[in-house]
Every structure is written in C-alpha cells, then in structure tokens.
Amino acid sequence: MKLPTDIFLKMAFVNIWRNARRSLITILAIEVGLGGLIFLWGYKDGAAAGMLENATSLFTGHVQVHALGFDKTMSPGLTITDPVRLIQDIQGHPEVIGIARRVKCGVMIGTSEHSKGAMLLGIDPQQEVNVTRVKSLITRGVFLSDGAKKEILLGDRLAEKLNVAVGDKVVVMVHSVDGLLTGFAYHVTGIFHAGTRILDEEVVYADIASAQELLGIGSDVSEIVVRLNDLRAMSSFLPFVNHAVDTAKYEVLTWDQAEPEAKSLADWGEGIVRVIVVAMTIVIAIGIMNTVIMSVLERTKEFGVMLAIGVKPRQLIRLVLLESFLLQCVGIGVGVFFGYSLVTYFGYVGIPLWYAADTFSAGYVSPVIYTRVYPEHVVLSVLILIVVTSVVSLYPAVRAGRLNPVAAIYRS
C-alpha cells in the first residue's frame, strides 16, 4: 500500500505529540545540546579573538620586520640600518594604517632598593599610537611626550614590585652594542594597566632616542611594526612587504610567528573545544537514540498492524525517520536561538575569569571573555547534530521495518 507524502507528514506530526512529554524531552535535549555547542564555540572564538586583539593591539602589531636572527637572539647589534626607506616603501600598501619603528632589548630596571629584568621598547610616541593602543592604557600619569627624552612608562605590576610611582626615577641598565654595561636614569611619566602579566610586569616603554643612545646604535632600530586595516589583508600584504625588504638582511614575521606562544595557546583551546564538542554530540546522540528506541518499543503493536494492512517496511522506516527529523528541526531551531541568545548576552556583559585571573593573565588572554561566534561554527554544529542524530535514528527505524506483523500484534 502506497501512502501519499502528506499522509506521512500528518501521521508523523500526530505520532510526535501522542507522547508530548517524551517529544518535549527530546526537543529539550537537542536545544540544550546545540545551544551548549554554540555557546562553547562562542566562548572559544571570543577568547581567541580577545587574545589576537590583545597581542596585536598591545604589543606585536600584525607584521614585524627585523634583522635576520634578531627574533631569536635579541642581539643589540642586529639592527635595521635603513628604517626610513623601509617605512616609506611599506607605507605604499593600501591596507597599512599604522607603522612604527622600535628599539627592543632586555634590560635590568630598578631603584636603590629593588630591581627586576624587563623588556625595554623604545618607541616614537607619534608612530606608536597608530600601531598599538598602549596610550589608552595609562591609568596614572601621562603618555610619553613628543620629543621626549629619558621618559619611561611602567606596567602597574612592575611599578608595584619596584615600589615606584609617577614622578619617581628608575635606573635602566643594559649591555650596549659594544658589550659595555651602560645605564640611564629615567623619569616615570606614566603607569599603565593592560590586564596581561606579560605587559604589566615585563614590558616598559621609553622614548626611542634615549633607547638608541643607551644601546649605542645611532639611528638604527630593532624592528618595524605594521598594523593593517584588516587581518584578512595579510595574504596580499606579505608578498608586498617581502618584495620591499632585502630578504638577505631582514626577515618578515606575522604576529603569530613573533609570539608563537599565543598561537599555541589558541590552538590548544581549539583542540579542547573540539574534544568537548565530540563528547557533547555523543551524549546528545545517545539520548535521541534511546528516545526513538523507546518510541518504537511502545508502538510495536501499532507498527505490526500497519505492516499487516499493507504498509511496506521501507515506508515504516521512512515514517520513523521523518518523526525523528521533525523533532530535530524543532530542537535545532530553538537550540540556535538559545545558543545565539547566550552568546549575545555574554558578548555584552562578558565572562570574568576571576577564578583563574593569574593563570590566564600570563599570556594575552583577557581577564574578561566577551563571547562571539563565527557563522561557520554554528553551521558546523548544526550539520554535525543532523548527521549524527540521523545516523543513530537509523537503527530503531530499521528495527521497526523488520518487525514480524503477527508477532508484533500479539506481543504482550
């Protein structure tokens, strides 16, 4: 007996709501599961985006140019000898919105009572504001002035360890390019708070002129840092900048090459999320399979009668799968709404990491995660759920189609 498609749909709808409690539990399982998956992706995407933004807007920029070998050794003698020409050439790319020269070196900074190792960044204040947002992080004092001489900015953690405040003086000592130990006294003009330990405790900013004098490198610089209008422009910018620089003398590094630890942390987070996604998907799939199996067992006599009056086994299989699919559609629709609602809410208020602030602040992870989710991750979650739930529904559906009509009807 051949049943029209509209009859199948009506029967499926009726069968779903014959046991409304079981159907609602199934829909709730799909909704909570999918909503949880979307929120999980939103948390990961938000953390990764925040870490990328912190790394590039606070420290690395999007692209850096160094002398060959400087990134690994930070030797003061490995410098860029023609920074003005390089900057002019690189600025020709339409996606470049900021470019800055820097002097970078490891130093010992201290007072008469305390001292600590740190990384000194000698910067041009006018250029740096177009590449990073360190100026906006000043909580006490002021940013470096234009044409500043021997002014320095400290992170709040470092200032606390050194027991210094705005207006105090600190001594910065370093081995110059000649190998001699040199030092300058700097005036603390500002204290900043970035929210990451690597910046608040280990990085100091000084005027570029005094940093060049401290190292004895003349007008040379350690690196050129570039900020792009859009990170997606990297694919067109890298060939351009590699053509502009002398690759026999200089190397071009992207932000994740300059800070591989940040990239490794992001990849680790991605792996953890994928493991949790698989685990949650398995739990959801088992729940749906159990629901469908219970439905088949409870309706064994009904299926036996249908087979006895001429309904073909494949039609019965189709009916069971259709019921499962309809439950999926409702659950997925509500689940996407639920997941997006969670992501939108926590994208606005944020998720504070007070329980592990010290752990996460060691890198570029923000102390507050603002969730966001990329459409491809939502689509991936939905597709995974559809495929898995469809597959696990096959077994009870096929089992229903293979019932013996007489045995099913007289089953006690």
Image: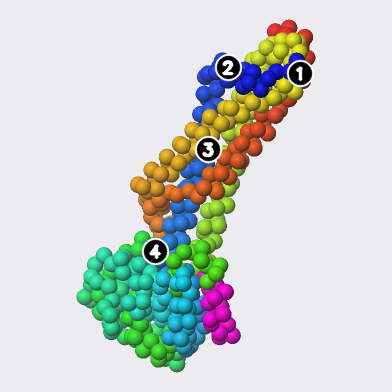
Nearer to the camera, 41 or 357: 41
Depth check, mark 2 against mark 4: the one in front is: 2
Q: Position of residue 277 (x, y in %)?
A: 57, 43
Q: Return the residue at label 1.
A: 312
Q: Residue at x 42, y 76 (%)?
A: 99
Q: Which residues are magenta?
A: 238-254
Residue type, numbered disc 3 = Leu
242 in relation to 288, above or below: below
Which secondary structure, mark 2? helix
Q: Position of residue 62 (x, y in %)?
A: 47, 69
Give the alpha-carbon distance from disc 3 to disc 4, as whole Å.
35 Å
Which secondary structure, mark 4? helix
Residue type, numbered disc 1 = Lys
Give the alpha-carbon distance from disc 2 to disc 1, as whole Å.
20 Å
Give the alpha-carbon distance from disc 3 to disc 2, as whole Å.
25 Å
Residue type, numbered disc 2 = Val
Taking the magenta stretch, the answer to whether it contains residue 106 is no
Of labels 3 and 4, earlier in sequence is: 3
Give the alpha-carbon distance from disc 3 to disc 1, as whole Å.
34 Å
Tell me, for residue 34, which label it has, or none. Answer: 3
Asked whether, in this view, residue 295 is left or right of residue 159, the answer is right
Of labels 2 and 4, earlier in sequence is: 2
Of labels 3 and 1, earlier in sequence is: 3
